[in-house]
Amino acid sequence: MKGVTLVAAACPVILGTGVAAYNLQWDVNSSNFLDYFVFDTETDPTKGFVNYVDQSTASNDGLYKTNNNQIHLGVDSTTMLDSSATGRNSVRVYSQDTFSSGILITDFAHLPVSVCGIWPAYWTINNQANPYGEIDILEAYDDVAGAYVSLHTGNTCTLSNSGFTGTDVRTDCTLSNGGGCGVQSTSNQFGAGFNAAGGGVWALSLEDSLQLWVFTRDEIPADITSGNPDPSSWDTPLFKFDSNNGCDVASNFIDQTVIFNLDFCGDNGAGGQEWSDWTDCASSTGQSTCNAYVAANPSAYSETYFSINSIKLYQ
Ligand SMILES: *[C@@H]1O[C@H](CO)[C@@H](O)[C@H](O)[C@H]1NC(C)=O
C-alpha cells in the first residue's frame, strides 16, 4: 500500500529567537491532489459494507470532484442496495509519500455529519514497519456527535492522562490490546457543528510529543494562515502523547502514509459492534443490522463527505 517516499525529511531550522521555522514539504490542494494521493480499490480489510471505487469511477459518479478549489471525497447517496451487496460505493485514498515528523495541517471545509452507519476516518499508518504505528487523527462512528482520536502501537505504549482537552480518555495504545489509546472530541470539532462554523483546521504535530489541535474557522491561528505554523504558541491540544519510558514518538510513528476513507459498518467498526452495543442505532433506525440500514437508505449519506481546502506538511 505504501508508496515511494519522494520527500526527504528536513530538520527544522532554529532561528535566533528560538522559534523553529518549518519548510512546506507537501502543498496539496484541488490542483494537484492526484499527484499526491492514490485511490485504493482493495476489499475493505475491516469488512465494512463498502465498495471502494477507482479514480475514474469516483470522478464519473461525483464521489471525487474538485469544485470551488476544494477536494470533495464522498459516497454514493442515491443508490438503493440489497444488503447482500458488496457495499455502498465510496472512496479510500492514500498518500504516495510518507512522513515521520513535522506538522500535518489539513483544512476542511466540510466533515461527514454524524448519522447511523458511517465510519469515516482521516488517519496515518505504517503497517509494514517494526514497530507498527497508526495515528487515527479523526474517526467517527454512527450518530455519535464527536470524533475519536486514537493511537495504535506495535510496542507497549501508555497515554498519560493530562495535557489535553479530549474526553473519555483511553490509555492503552498497544495494538494487541484492542481499541487503542485516545480521546473523544467535542461535537463542535466534528460534523454539523464544525461545518456550521465554516469548517477549520486539524493540525497534527509529530515531534518529541504527538499533538493534535482542532481550530474552527474563526479560531485558526494567524501563523497557520500565513504559512509559518508555530505549535508552541497554540492553546492546549485536543490530544497529546508525550514520549515516555519505552515509547518515544520518534521511533513508534515512522514513515506514516496518510489515508482518507469513508467506510460503513465494519466488523469492529461503526456497524458491527457499535450498532447495537454502544449507539442507539438499532433502536433509532429500527434495523437490526447496520448493513441493512446502509443498503436501504442512500439519502442518509448526502452529508457523508470530506471537503478539503488543503493538506500541508511542514518539516
Ligand atoms: C496549490 O498547490 C500548488 C502547488 O503546491 C501551489 O502552487 C498553489 O499556490 C496552491 N493553491 C492554493 C490556492 O493554495
Image (tube, rainbow, N blue to C red):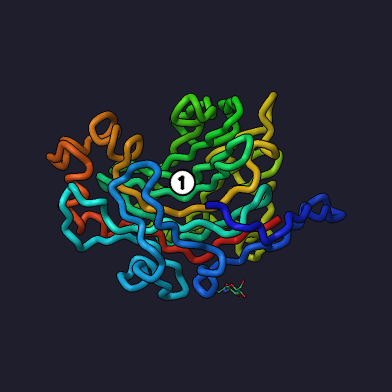
Find out if the beta carbon at label 1 lies less than 8 Å from the nearest ligand 1 atom: no
Reply above or below: 73 against 184: below
Of residue 169 and residue 265, the one placed in the foreground of this image is 265
Q: Secondary structure at mark 1?
A: strand
Q: Residue at x 58, y 38 (%)?
A: 133
Image quadrant for the C terminus? bottom right
Per the image, the residue denoted by label 1 is 138
Location of residue 295 with respect to 37 vertically, above or below: above
Q: Can you give x and y, in whole percent of width and height, for residue 221 in the image?
A: 60, 57
Total marks shown come to 1
The residue drawn where x is 55% and y is 58% is: 95
Quarter where residue 15 is shown: bottom right
> Looking at the image, can residue 63 be seen?
yes
Residue 77 horizontal/vertical position (percent): 24, 61
Drawn side of residue 22 relative to residue 185, left or right: right
Kind of residue at badge 1: Leu
Q: Is residue 1 toward the left or the right of residue 8 in the image?
A: left
Task: Give the residue displayed 57% in from the left and 44% down from the top.
Answer: 126
Quadrant where ligand 1 appears: bottom right
- Spot occupied by residue 115 in the image (x, y as percentages of width and height): 27, 48
Instruction: Tell me which residue sits at (59%, 25%) in the image.
Output: 156
The x and y percentages for residue 166 are: 49, 36
Residue located farthest toward the left when viewing the structure as drawn: 286
